[in-house]
Amino acid sequence: MALAGGVNVLLSPIGFLGGAQASMLSPTGRCHPFSSLADGFVRAEGAGVFVLKPLSAALTDGDRVHAVIAGTGSNCDGHTAGLSMPSSEAQALLLERVYARAGIDPGHVDYVEAHGTGTRAGDPVECAALEAVLVRGAARRCRWGR
């Protein structure tokens, strides 16, 4: 068994200054991911901790299993117009690789917790990647959350 956690505490104004200068932060202070009202993201603090345990051990111990990590992945495209500009092609390729390694048919995915930055640059790119991978040949409609 292992504990995995993370904390985001905003102790320095540098992140706010850089985000504001790059027009990434919402001037209204409200995040509207995947919406025509999207005007940037809102920085926030938070913390979370997970108990990680092999599925077989959790079942043997009678634990309540909330989720199973079937696969993970990360990438960086490096071929976009700017450092902070995402690539729908790179995101779609990552999704395809992770689902393939995990043995999951993307057409059977019920729900995706999306990144959804609420930016005009990021949200359309993320939607295009999700649509390219999850909608093609889908057995049912996938819900997206933020």
Image (cartoon, helix red, strand yellow):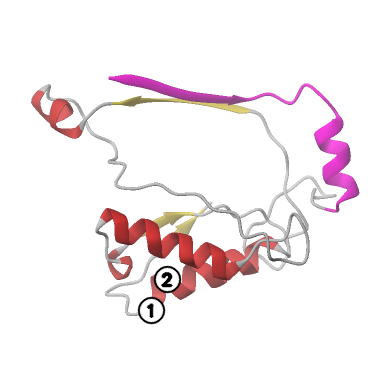
Q: Which residue is mark 2?
A: 133
Q: Position of residue 110 (x, y in %)?
A: 33, 61
Compared with 120, 30 (above or below) is: above
**Magenta residue check for 13:** yes
Is residue 76 at all visible to an observer of this figure? yes
Q: Quadrant of residue 18?
A: top right
* Residue type, numbered disc 1: Arg
Disc 1, SS? loop
Tell me, yes or no, whether the two marked residues, 1 and 2, touch with CB atoms within 8 Å: yes
In this rendering, position of residue 125 left or right of residue 113: right
Question: Which is nearer the eye, 137 or 118?
Answer: 137
Compared with 136, 4 (above or below) is: above
**Magenta residue check for 40:** no
Mark 1 burial class by Cα count in 10 Å: few <14, some 14-19, many 20+: few
Q: Residue furthest bottom?
A: 137
In this rendering, position of residue 48 left or right of residue 106: right
Q: Residue furthest left?
A: 60
Is residue 143 at all visible to an observer of this figure? no
* Residue type, numbered disc 2: Val
Q: Residue at x 67, y 59 (%)?
A: 78
Alpha carbon of mark 1 to alpha carbon of mark 2: how far?
A: 6 Å
Q: Which residues are magenta?
A: 1-23
Q: Which residue is mark 1?
A: 136
Q: Quadrant of residue 102?
A: bottom left
Q: Residue furthest front?
A: 78
Q: Position of residue 138 (x, y in %)?
A: 32, 75
In this rendering, position of residue 43 left or right of residue 33: right
Q: Position of residue 83 (x, y in %)?
A: 76, 55
